[in-house]
Image (cartoon, helix red, strand yellow):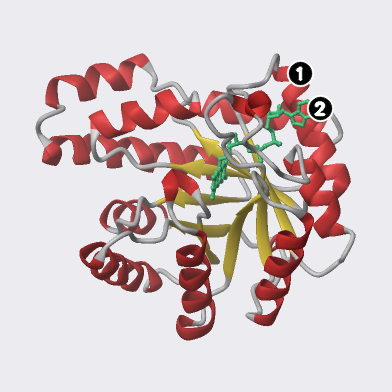
Amino acid sequence: MKIKDLFDSGEKTYSFEFFPPKNFSSILELGINVGQLMNLSPSFISVTYGAGGSTQDASFNLIDYINNKIGLVTMAHYTCVNATKEKVAQDLDFFQEKNIENLILLRGDLPPGGAESGKNISDFKYASDLIEYVASQDRFCIAAAGYPETHPESSSSEKDIQYLKHKVDKGADFVVTQLFFDNNYYFDFVKRARKAGITIPIVPGIMPITNFKQIKKFTQMCGAKIPETLVQQLEPHQEDLGKTYDIGVEFAINQCRELLDKGAPGLHFYTLNKSRATVDIFTSIK
Ligand code: FAD
């Protein structure tokens, strides 16, 4: 099933993101958590690719398993850093063979030293180049990444929206956003996107906070800000994971409710391969 058909039917989508596990115990943990989340009948599951040093084969094996052995609708993450046209063509054939119909097409994070390091031998400079190449084949439903707080490498939020528009013009069917905690960034982002002529669904990315130290690291990497009021609530309890969980989940429930009430077309949960927080949030908002 192509995810764009879900949006066309007016249904809100609820999706869960996983990354490929690295060792035996994390494989078991993932299996248990996917099992828990399956009970929620998600609209689709996505699997990251190459993020945090995960291997590409592991991503492909996991998405194949979830799509074909478990039978859920899937969206494969796919990046073009270091990818030649030949490699991309082979991988697209793999996705088609395995009936994986939805791809989120990304540039990926640049190697140390950035674009000028000479270490990125890609035939595609930006995600928009990859999107153009894949969309021209008319085989897949395509998502692109969006940044409510602007991509960290962007010179300005205006430029960032222009580049997002470029990805849409090249063939993206919907957008999934980077995680954020202040909904005003999302609402403003959607407003700016609509003004720039972007009409496709923009699905907010939600990361439940269950560990304050870990979330501080993530947000530093991706440029998302944690609202000061939330920091003040979480900081005194950062060694108490139980209390952190309660604060983080309550915050996410309110965040998700407001997003849905004010028209978000769905929610995409960055699960970090855990299920408890997502299950608690999901059952509370549904
Ligand atoms: P692009 O859209 O190419 O943008 C990269 C930068 O270049 C931005 O600053 C943009 O403003 C600028 N830019 C774009 N076009 C132009 C142009 N024509 N001229 C000049 N500047 C331009 N990473 C992984 O490695 N694996 C994953 O599985 C993964 N999944 C993700 C899922 C989501 C929902 C999100 C939001 C991010 C994900 N990422 C993943 C991270 C992503 O790869 C990084 O954020 C990366 O730095 C940018 O990717 P992009 O596709 O947004 O790039």
Image point (78%, 56%), residue name: 85
Q: Quadrant of the N terminus?
A: bottom right
Q: Which residue is mark 2?
A: 162
Image location of residue 111, percent across then percent down: 55, 34
Specify whether 197 is left or right of 233.
Answer: right
Q: Is residue 128 above or below residue 74?
A: above
| Mark identifier at residue 158 | 1
Image location of residue 41, percent across then percent down: 46, 72
Q: Are marks 2 and 1 in contact (CB under 8 Å)?
A: yes
Question: Is label 2 in a helix, a strand or a loop?
Answer: helix
Mark 2 to mark 1 CA distance (whole Å): 6 Å
Quadrant of the rendered image containing residue 145: top right
Query: Is there any visible trace of residue 28 in the rendered image?
Result: yes
Specify whether 177 is left or right of 138.
Answer: left
Image location of residue 242, percent across then percent down: 12, 41
Query: Is there any visible trace of residue 8 in the rendered image?
Result: no
Residue nearer the viewer, 182 or 150 = 150
Residue found at the far front of this picture: 118
Specify whether 132 is left or right of 192.
Answer: right
